[in-house]
Each structure stands twice: as C-alpha cells, then as structure tokens.
C-alpha cells in the first residue's frame, strides 16, 4: 500500500520547519514529486488535498502549472470539497492566457444551472475573478437567469458577475441593463449594493445608459435618505453609520448622474446637505461617507452654499488627528484650488501648518497647495512661511519648494527689492536645487532695477564672502560685482549697513572663486569676466587682474582659455576699446533675445543662438576677422578657430553691444621711441561714428635684461586739439619682453588739423633714472584727415 | 479593487487575490516591488501611497500587512473599512485570528474573502450573512472520516 500522503497542515509544518532556503526547496521538491505521481495515478480521493498542497507551495513562489488540469477534474467532481478546492485552484492557477481555462466553461455552466446554491456561488465567484471574454459571452444567459432567482445569496453574486462580464464584453450591457431598475426595489443590502455597482458600470460605459438611469435619481435619493434617517440596523452598521459601503456606492452613482445635469443635481441637493451635516465624524466610517459626499458635491452642479460647505468639511478634515483623513483632504483641496479658489483660501493657515507634517507625502501636498494659494495680498506672509519651510524641508522637496517660491515671487512681488531679497534667500538656502534659468532671471531683475544696484551688489558681496559653494549664487554675485564693482567700493548705501571693502579684497574674492574646486566651469567664466570688468571699475592699477588673465591663457578648460586670451588681447592691443567694451550692460530684452552673455545651459544656449538678432552677426564676424588678421600678423598665442556666434563666445556678445562698432581699415602703428631695449609704440583707431575722435594706444615694451619701473608717460597736443589721457595699465615693464604697459589717449580733432604730440617719458632702468622728451610729428595722415 | 495582498513583516506572501488578468511573472514583480515599498514605510506614515498609476491602501494588523490596490476614482477611506471588515470576519471565524491561522488555513482565508468581495467589489455588507454562508459551506465539506472509509 502506498504511504498515505501528507496532510496539508503537516506539509505546511514541515516547510516552516526547514532551517534554510535550500532545505525548504528540498522538502517542496520531494512533495511535488509525490503530488505529480498522485495526479498521474489519478487518485480521486486525495486529489483535493494534493491540489491544496500545491496551491500552498505556489504561494511561496514555486511552479504549480502541472496542477491546472487537476483543477478541471476537481471542478467536475460531484463532491463539494472537490469543487471548493478546484475552483480556488482555477482562480489561482488558470487565467485567460492559458487555453486550458476554456475547459472549465462547461463545468461552470452545469454548476450554474443545476448546482445547489453554494456551488452556484463558487461558480459565479470564479467566473467573476478569472472569466475571459469568451467565457463571459458563453455564460451570459446563465447569469442572466440567476439575476431573477429568488435566493438573495445567488442573486447578489450574479449581479456582480454581470459587472465583471460587462467590463470584459461591453456589448453585454444590453443584456444586463433591463433588470436593473427592478432590482433597485429590493431591500437586501447585498442586492442593492450590487445593483448600484452594476448601474454605475453601465453609466460609465455608455452615455445612453447614463441618460436612461437619470430617472432613478429620485429613487436613489430615497434609498439613501432612508439609510441615513431611520436609525441603524446593527447588522449593517459601522460605528453608528448605516451601511457606509452602500452609502458610498450610492453617492458615487449620484455623482455620475448629477454631473453636468442641473435637474438631477437639484434633486439631490438637499439630501447631500443632510448627509454632509448629519454624518457622525468620530470614526473613519463616517468620514469615508463624508468624503464621498464632498466629492459628489464638488462634481455636480450644486448650489454655491453647498460647495462652500464641502470645502469647509475638507478644511475640518485638515485638522483631524488621523493623518489619513488629512491626506485625502489635501489631495482633494489640491484638485479644487483652481475652481474654488476663494473657498480654499479660507483654510490657508491650516494648509500652511500641514507643511510641518512628518509624512513626506502629506508635506508635499501641503507644499503644492500652499504654492497654489499664494496671491498678491498674502504673498509676503506666505513667502515667509515657505522660506522657513525651505530651510528645514526634506531634500526631495527642496527643488520644488525653491522653484515654487521663485515662480510665486515673480508673479506677485510687491517691490523689486523684496523680489531680489527673496531670490537671494532662495539661492543661499537651496542654491543647488534651483532651476537653470534662476541665474538669468536674477541678473535680469537686478539689471533692470537701477536704484537697487548698490544694494544688490553689497548683499551679494556679503553672501559670496560667506559661502562660495552655491553655484547659482556665486554666478549672480560674480556678475553683479563685475558690473557694479564701483558701487561696491563707494561705501554708501542707505538700506544696508555701511561696508568698507577695499579693492584687493574684492579681487581676492573673485580669484578665490576662480581657483576653487567647487566652482563649475561656467562659474569660473563668470568670475573671470567679472575680474575683467573690474579693470575699468576700480581705481588701482590693473596688474593683478592682468596677471590672473594671463595665467588662464593656458588653462586646460578651453572656454576659460579662450576668454583669457581674448581679455589679454584686449589689454594689449585694444586697450583703447577696453572701457567701451566693458561698460555697464544695457538692460537686456526679457524674452530670450540676449538674456545673459554668460548663459551656459544648453537650453538657454539653444534659445539664445536662435534669438541673436541678425544685424549684429555680420558686425561680430567682421571683428573676428580683424582679430584673426592681427593675431596672424603678430604671431601671437594660439587663437582657437573662428568663433561661431554661440553663447560660448563671450567676447562675441560683449562686442555685440551697440557701443562697439567694427573698426574700418587699420591705421599702421608707429614706433616713436627706442632706448636700450625699451620701446614705445603708438597704435591708432578712428571710430567711424565719431570722425573727430582719435584713439591712440601707447604701448611700452622692454626687450632688455633689466626691468623698467616707475614708468610715467605724459603728453601734450597743439591748442586746436583736445587730449584726454586714461590711467596706464601699470608702471612696470619686466625685462625680456615682460608684460607691456598700455595707455589710452583720446584726442578730439574736429577741425581735422594735423596731429602732433609732445611726449615726456620718465622711468628707472638699470638703476638709473631716465627722462626723455620728444616730439612726434610723423603720425600717419589717416589718423587726422 | 485590482488586487489584495497579505504579507508578513518579513515579506512572505500569505494571500494574493488578483482581480485583473496578469501573467505569473508580472504578478511576482508587482508583489516584490510593492512589498518592498510598503515594508519601507515608517510607522507614522499615512496608509495611502501612490504607486505606478494606482492608489495603494495598506494597514498592518499585528504581524500581517493587508494591502489593496484601488483605482483613481475609488475612495481610500472606505477601502480602509473594507480591510477592517475582512479582518473582523477572519477574527470571528478563527476566534482571535493570528498570522498562523492564515498560514495553516489559507484556503479558508480565500473562502471568507470570496464571500465578502466578488470581482473586486463588495458583495455583502452584513457580517452575519458572510459568516453564515461560510458556516453552511463548511458543513457541506465531506468530513475526513467519510473519505477514509471509502478507501
């Protein structure tokens, strides 16, 4: 005799006794082998027990497909125990993907038409769980018959099976629609519930059905009213609320029927008000009904007063100690904030309190809602709350909070200064989380607020001095210091404490940014350009700046290298243009035209390269040719290939400014002095828009072995001319071709008189002081004609 | 409802009821991911979370997590009541139910669920009726004695 097979519970015991995964596998594999053998042998008596064991191991994740056919056999058996396990097996192991599933259709049909009630129940349950479209089509007539059976036990199941069938085969709606109205008269809660679910399904699928069922709105209202008012039956109640499952389902159907339909909405108005005010809210069951009521009120054409009531219920939910209730309240209010803004505004303080929620999903919703509630009258208070939140909020909410604050600030800023302060605060608190265009926006904003330049540059300087790690902040600060460095040093600004800053400190700070490993390449670009601009804003000599620029000429970063080379060239050959080029930027057009010369982000870059106005391009490229020409002629350091007008070429944009037009044909240089390796050269530029103006750059070079120090050049011109001399770039020319000194002379010659110069040079060379006075009469005619 | 899962604090599955057709592989994947997600939640967090395009409602009773996936238009709060009602039914049936009852009598747990929900919808709101139906079905189960005698 074959050893009796393990009972289900014994197997479970054995599996749980296994100490390791491997042991468990062993036990299961052994048992499955027995089960397989048993299936092969076709033992009908223990088949149900074998399948049950198989279903257990299936739940643990082991394969059980060889049990599928056994399900069929068990379902076909006459024993209830077999059917029970067989149908369970079918629901767990068979689904519409397996061809085998169709084989149970016949058994189901038999059980539906001839089985005792519990068996009918099993069949209906299985059909509604795994019934495929084909099965549903086949078995629809049987289910339809069962809708009319007297037993509520079977009818309620048949109704819900019909719901499943319609989901699988929408055409079956026509079969199951007719009985519905009649079924609504039933008293049995299960049947009512099923019917309402069925009607809901029908209405959601077909506008015709929707219209058809509008006529039952009064009846539904009556059913719900009865439930709510005539005390409760303990059988169906939860925490003193009459059958909340049924109430919720009715409310949902009413929502669908009342949507966009005045008449229906009106019919249910009073009832909804009644439910909203009378439902017990001490436990979750009542709140579930209340919640569904609110959803319905907000979705149909309800009276204004009712809508406000609904929003207030949500507001009360926000104060509930149960965080689940707060969650649904926040989610719903978020959906309503646009359509019922003023009603939701009333609960703003509570919403703001919810920012402190420990559960991130709640605080996130509270944040979204808070941002949606900001308007021009509450912006200051709200921003304060939100900024406080930004400082302490969890990291995954930082970015959204920061960009939300910036957006709201943009829309509702009461003053420019407040706006600047707000952005500044966001950049210092959450700099790494702001969106890419924050930098451009802030520079734009500051640029446009002339009265706030001094204030801005000071605040930014202070912020930068404290922390150079937050890149967006560093970029804006560097830009600002570059643009308004003169205001920074002036010392006077009413709105902020007086600040004594000296030039060296400013330069040191920018150099620190340049050198810091925390600075992104873009940031270093900003810093370098800022340093360059300061060469015209500061009083002292530019040696330090020139040195820094010089160092970066060999920087590995190509962008930085390019800038450094261009700036260096600016010092050396175009010094007379330097001031003009580095003048304060005019306010740029907001929408993309030339947003910010430093924009490196590809998105901004794409915008900019599209938006560069066409007329300036030829100018830029002419100048580029000029540079190429001169560089080629003087054999200068490697110049990268011709720039295309992309934002990467900062020099292009600088030169795109209207104040820097391209020069006409170059006037030849003139060497006016030479002594022991020290040379003085003059180069000339005549700007086309001002023919009376002559710009001369005097360049002192030193090819000797000794340094030239304390170099001073003075000049005089005939009375008919006016001469303006700018500060020299320095007073030292190091030996052996060290960094030359350049100095710009501006000569106004409206009468086109021949230009003559008298020059006086004094300097120290080879431990001797040198003084030279001489006249220059042989200036090229192009310089004055 | 799209599906209901019961699992232990160690992530062991104790019951899985699927109301939508999915392959075994997909079911395993969903189960694994969802179990991980829910187990990672801290005790003070709310019972709802958004996962893929579904709303997940879960509640822990002793050592078992009850986890339901509902659709966007479904009411989360009433789903909590559904879960609670199911636990009450189990409790009444087994008499102070614990995880071990559900492990050793998993088929019964399914049978009880199938008298409460059908096709993902609530079919019976009376506790009494559900328990009565189970009782009657249990009576129909041929007792072991008979099957042994037939051998």
Image: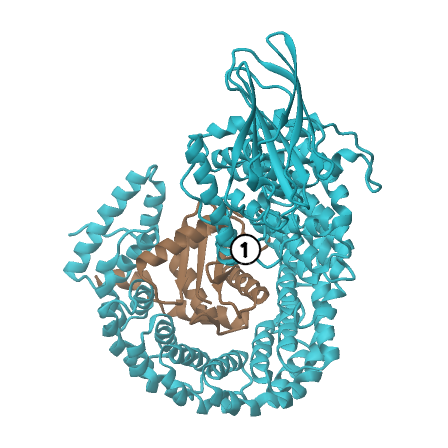
Between A315 and A283, the one lying in front of the other is: A315
Q: In this view, does A258 lie to the left or right of A277?
A: left
Where residue A441 appears, x then y in whole percent?
A: 63, 51
Query: In the rendered picture of this protein, how many numbered marks are placed on residues?
Result: 1
Q: Chain A is drawn in which colour?
A: cyan
Q: Which residue is drawn at 22% across and 70% down?
A: A99
Quadrant assignment for the C terminus of chain A: top right
Rendering colour mode: by chain
Q: Which residue lies furthest to the top in this view?
A: A767
For the question of whether residue A516 can be seen, the reply is no
Q: Which residue is tagged 1?
A: B59
Q: Which residue is drawn at 23% across and 51% down?
A: A32
Where residue A327 appears, x then y in whole percent?
A: 62, 59
Seen in the picture, residue A741 relative to A364 is either above or below; the reply is: above
Between A361 and A62, the one lying in front of the other is: A361
Dot 1: what SS?
A: strand
Where residue A5 appears, x then y in whole percent?
A: 24, 52
Q: In this view, does A457 lie to the left or right of A14?
A: right
Chain shown brown: that is B
């Amino acid at each position: 005799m074959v050893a009796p097979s393990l009972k289900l519970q014994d197997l479970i015991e054995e599996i749980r006794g296994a100490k390791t995964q491997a042991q468990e596998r062993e036990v299961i594999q052994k048992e499955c082998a027995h089960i397989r053998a048993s299936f092969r042998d076709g033992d009908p008596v223990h088949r149900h027990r074998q399948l049950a064991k198989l279903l257990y191991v299936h739940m643990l994740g082991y394969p059980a497909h060889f049990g599928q056919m056994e399900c069929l056999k068990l379902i076909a058996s006459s024993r209830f125990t077999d059917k029970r396990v067989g149908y369970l097996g079918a629901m767990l192991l068979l689904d519409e993907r397996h061809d085998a599933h169709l084989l149970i259709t016949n058994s189901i049909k038999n059980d539906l038409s001839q089985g005792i009630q519990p068996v009918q129940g099993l069949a209906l349950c299985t059909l509604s769980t795994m019934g495929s479209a084909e099965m549903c089509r086949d078995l629809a007539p049987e289910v339809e018959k069962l809708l009319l059976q007297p037993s509520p036990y079977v009818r309620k199941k048949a109704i819900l099976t019909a719901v499943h069938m319609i989901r699988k085969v929408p055409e079956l709606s026509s079969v199951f629609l007719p009985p519905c109205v009649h079924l609504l008269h039933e008293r049995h809660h299960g049947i009512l519930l099923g019917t309402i679910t069925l009607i809901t399904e029908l209405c959601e699928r077909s506008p015709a059905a929707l219209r058809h069922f509008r006529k039952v709105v009064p009846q539904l209202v009556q059913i719900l009213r009865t439930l709510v008012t005539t005390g409760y039956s303990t059988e169906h109640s939860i925490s003193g609320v009459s059958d909340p499952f049924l109430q919720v389902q009715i409310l949902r159907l009413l929502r669908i029927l009342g949507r966009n339909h005045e008449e229906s909405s009106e019919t249910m108005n009073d009832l909804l008000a009644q439910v909203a005010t009378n439902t017990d809210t001490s436990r979750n069951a009542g709140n579930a009904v209340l919640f569904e009521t609110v959803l319905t009120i907000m979705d149909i054409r309800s009276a204004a007063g009712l809508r406000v009531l609904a929003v207030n219920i949500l507001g009360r939910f926000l104060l509930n100690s149960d965080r689940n209730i707060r969650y649904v309240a926040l989610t719903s209010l978020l959906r309503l904030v646009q359509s019922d803004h003023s009603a939701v505004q009333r609960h703003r303080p509570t919403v703001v309190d919810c920012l402190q929620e420990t559960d991130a999903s709640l605080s996130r919703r509270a944040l979204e809602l808070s941002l949606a509630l900001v308007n021009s009258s509450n912006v200051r208070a709200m921003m304060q709350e939100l900024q406080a939140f930004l400082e302490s909020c969890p990291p995954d909410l930082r970015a959204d909070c920061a960009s939300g604050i910036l957006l709201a600030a943009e829309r509702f800023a009461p003053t420019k200064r407040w706006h600047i302060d707000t952005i500044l605060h966001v950049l210092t608190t959450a700099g790494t989380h702001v969106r890419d265009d924050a930098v451009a926006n802030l520079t734009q904003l500051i640029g446009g607020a002339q009265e706030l330049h001094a204030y801005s540059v000071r605040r930014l300087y202070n912020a930068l001095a404290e922390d150079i790690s937050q890149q967006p902040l560093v970029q804006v600060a560097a830009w600002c210091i570059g643009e308004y460095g003169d205001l920074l040093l002036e010392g006077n600004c009413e709105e902020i404490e007086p600040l004594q800053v000296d030039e060296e400190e400013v330069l040191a700070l920018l150099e620190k940014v340049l050198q810091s490993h925390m600075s992104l390449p873009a940031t270093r670009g900003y810093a370098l350009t800022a340093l360059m601009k300061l060469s015209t804003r500061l009083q002292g000599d530019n040696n330090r700046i020139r040195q820094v620029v010089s160092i970066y000429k060999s920087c590995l970063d190509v962008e930085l290298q390019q800038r450094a080379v261009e700036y260096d060239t600016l010092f050396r050959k175009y010094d007379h243009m330097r001031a003009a080029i580095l003048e304060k930027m005019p306010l740029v057009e907001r929408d993309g035209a030339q947003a910010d010369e430093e924009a490196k982000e590809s998105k901004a870059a794409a915008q900019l390269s599209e938006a560069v106005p066409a007329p300036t391009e030829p100018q830029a490229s002419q100048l580029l040719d000029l540079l190429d020409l001169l560089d080629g002629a003087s054999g200068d350091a490697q110049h990268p290939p011709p720039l295309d007008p992309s934002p990467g070429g900062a020099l292009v944009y600088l030169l795109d400014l209207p104040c820097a037009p391209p020069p006409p044909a170059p006037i030849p240089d003139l060497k006016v002095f030479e002594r022991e390796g020290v040379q003085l050269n003059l180069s000339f530029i005549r700007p086309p828009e001002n023919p009376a103006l002559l710009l001369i750059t005097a360049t002192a070079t030193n090819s000797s072995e000794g340094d030239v120090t304390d170099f001073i050049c003075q000049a005089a011109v005939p009375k008919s001319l006016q001469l303006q001399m700018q500060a020299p770039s320095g007073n030292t020319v190091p030996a052996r071709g060290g960094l030359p000194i350049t100095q710009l002379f501006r000569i106004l010659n409206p009468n086109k008189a021949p230009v003559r110069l008298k020059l006086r040079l004094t300097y120290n060379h080879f431990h001797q002081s040198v003084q030279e006075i001489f006249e220059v009469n042989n200036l090229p005619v192009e310089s004055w004609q | 409802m799209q599906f209901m899962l019961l699992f232990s604090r160690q992530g062991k599955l104790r019951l899985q009821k699927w109301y939508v057709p999915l392959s075994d592989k997909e079911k395993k994947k969903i189960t694994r991911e969802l179990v991980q997600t829910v187990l990672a939640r801290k005790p003070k967090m709310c019972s709802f979370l958004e996962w893929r395009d579904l709303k997940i409602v879960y509640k822990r009773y002793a050592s078992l997590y009850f986890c339901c996936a509902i659709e966007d238009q479904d009411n989360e709060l009433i789903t909590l009541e559904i879960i609670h009602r199911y636990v009450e039914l189990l409790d009444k049936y087994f008499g102070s139910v614990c995880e071990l009852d559900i492990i050793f009598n998993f088929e019964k747990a399914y049978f009880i669920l199938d008298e409460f929900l059908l096709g993902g919808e609530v079919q019976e709101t009376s506790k009494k009726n559900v328990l009565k139906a189970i009782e009657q079905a249990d009576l129909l189960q041929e007792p072991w004695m008979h099957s042994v005698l037939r051998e």
